[in-house]
Image (cartoon, rainbow, N blue to C red):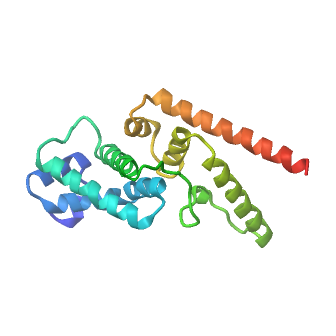
Amino acid sequence: MSAINIQTVSDQDLVHQYIQGHEQSLEELIRRHKSKIYTSIYLLVKDSYLAEDIFQDVFIKVINTLRAGRYNEEGKFLPWVIRIAHNMVIDHFRKEKRTPLVTTTEGFDIFEVLKFYDESAEDRLIRDQTHRDLRELIHHLPSEQKEVLIMRHYGDLSFKEIADITDVSINTALGRMRYALSNLRKMMLTKELSLKNI
């Protein structure tokens, strides 16, 4: 199979081709989805080396599952792999006996999806401070709300994908997002009021 047409093949067909022995099909699946899968791991562990290790472990499990013929064809490839990644992150923290704190770092900013052009230095300072404040507030959200917020805005996942990964209904995922945004608004309002009283 040539490199030109492999990019037009569906994930499902690539999976079938890999199972039949075409190694380059798996390489194409990894190329297509590495960014989303890695980011979803990184956001939970906040350590690039650990995220890379877990990412590699995820694909070892993916390969073993595919080779053993245990791949469930009902789901899409990406949500299936992200669910494996999510479970491996949970397993890692269980072993470590600590809970992941889903916060962002300067290198990965949830708000970089917003484009700001022609800012003055003052505008940039205000925006950076606002983002720091907002990241701090996100840190105080309950873990389920934090997780949905980050998967939606950072991982660019649909609510159906989030529901599948976190093993809840779409309504529950939507509800968690609504509560997360509502709680953020309340915290921002409380912060504004407390600043006015200083």
Q: Residue at x 68, y 66 (%)?
A: 117
Q: Residue at x 41, y 55 (%)?
A: 41
Q: Position of residue 18 (x, y in %)?
A: 14, 54
Q: Position of residue 79 (x, y in %)?
A: 34, 43
Residue most toward the bottom?
Answer: 121
Q: Is residue 88 above or below residue 54?
A: above
Q: Position of residue 52 (x, y in %)?
A: 36, 64
Q: Is residue 143 above or below residue 127?
A: above
Q: Residue at x 61, y 38 (%)?
A: 180
Front residue (pair 6, 11) = 11
Q: Position of residue 190 (x, y in %)?
A: 79, 42
Residue most toward the front?
Answer: 97
- Quarter of the image where the N terminus is located: bottom left
Q: Name the image quarter holding residue 126.
A: bottom right
Can residue 56 be seen here? The reply is: yes
Does 82 sit left or right of 108 as displayed? left
Residue most toward the left?
Answer: 20
Q: Is residue 96 above or below residue 179?
A: below
Front residue (pair 7, 80) = 80
Front residue (pair 34, 116) = 34
Can residue 16 be seen here? The reply is: no
Q: Name the image quarter holding residue 116.
A: bottom right
Does 112 sit left or right of 22 as displayed? right
Q: Residue at x 46, y 50 (%)?
A: 98
Does 119 sit left or right of 52 as displayed? right
Q: How many marks?
A: 0
Does 84 sit left or right of 21 as displayed? right
